[in-house]
Image: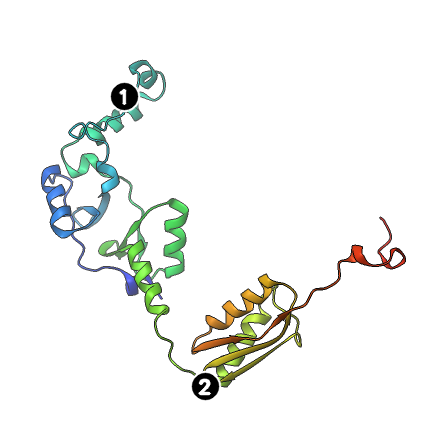
Amino acid sequence: MQARDIMTPDVITVRPDTPLSELVQIMLRHGITAVPVVDGDSVVGIVSEGDLLRRPELGTIPVRPRWLLMLGFPDRAADTYTRTHGRTAGEVMSAPVMTVAEDAAVEDVAALMERHRVKRLPVLRGGRLVGIVARADLLRALALRLGPPVGGDDRRIRDALLAELRAQPWAPSPGEIAVLVRDGVVRLSGSARSAAQRQAVVAAAESTPGVRAVEDEMSIRHDPDPMDRPGWLRDPPP
């Protein structure tokens, strides 16, 4: 799945010279929380609700000692003043803006959002804006994946589950559990070495495509603690 598959197309945009009053009305009218700022064919920034939290009109500008601002980073203080007091989109926007290509894998989109702590990413095709991906779009994609399962071939389901378990370092050894599949229902039997391992096996079965239900008949075996063995059977001290 790629960014183009989950993005919202036909993005509403503003220009750098769009008045702040008009920008706010656009966001309210369309029920959106952010607007990309476009200059020609290029995305030059984005204005979100977060960019508008600190405004003199709201009385939300933090008061800092003048000497502290000038002693530190005066240029940064000047930039902050412009963003909190600006009256156009270009003055209040966050820039530069992070973007993704339309063929970016969804897993990369999610990783980028998480790593940079952003809630949305403009989607580009050849440098031009073609959509935007927000966290809500990822949730909708997840909802589709979690929808009613479509039945699959029992053998294919069993093979897929066993392949997934073989790839996991925590999985039980071959022969410790048995996997039977009938009409899309997976029956798990045998023993797991811990509750965590048992739950992970169930989760792997539940997430296998085509599975309609999982019947967990596994038990948890309690391997003896090495310290409970007679002294002469314990490992010698190092």
- Residue 213, by quadrant, is bottom left
Which numbered circle lies on residue 185?
none
Compared to residue 155, the image places residue 237 above or below, namely above
Q: Which residue is mark 2?
A: 183
Q: What's the amino acid at mark 2?
A: Asp
Q: Nearer the viewer, residue 122 or 148?
A: 148
Image coords of residue 203 (percent x, y): 50, 67
Q: Nearer the viewer, residue 146 or 105?
A: 146
Image coords of residue 128 (percent x, y): 22, 54
Q: What's the amino acid at mark 1?
A: Val
Please tell me whether mark 2 sits on a helix, a strand or a loop: loop
Dot 2 crowding, Cα within 10 Å, few <14, some 14–19, many 20+: few
Residue shown at the point (14%, 36%) measured from the top left: 88
Q: Seen in the image, is 93 located left or right of residue 112?
A: left
Compared to residue 129, the image places residue 72 above or below, namely above
Q: Quadrant of the N terminus?
A: bottom left
Q: Which residue is mark 1?
A: 63
Counting labels gives 2
Q: Nearer the viewer, residue 130 or 202?
A: 202
The label nearer to you, 2 versus 1, is 2
Image coords of residue 99 (percent x, y): 30, 50
Image coords of residue 51 (percent x, y): 24, 38
Please tell me whether mark 1 sits on a helix, a strand or a loop: loop
Q: Which comes before the other along the chain, label 2 or label 1?
A: 1
Residue shown at the point (10%, 38%) measured from the top left: 21
Q: Are marks 2 and 1 in contact (CB under 8 Å)?
A: no
- In the rendered image, the residue lying farthest to the top is 67
Q: Seen in the image, is 59 located left or right of residue 173?
A: left
Label 2 to label 1: alpha-carbon separation: 67 Å
Scheme of colours in the image: rainbow
Dot 1 crowding, Cα within 10 Å, few <14, some 14–19, many 20+: few
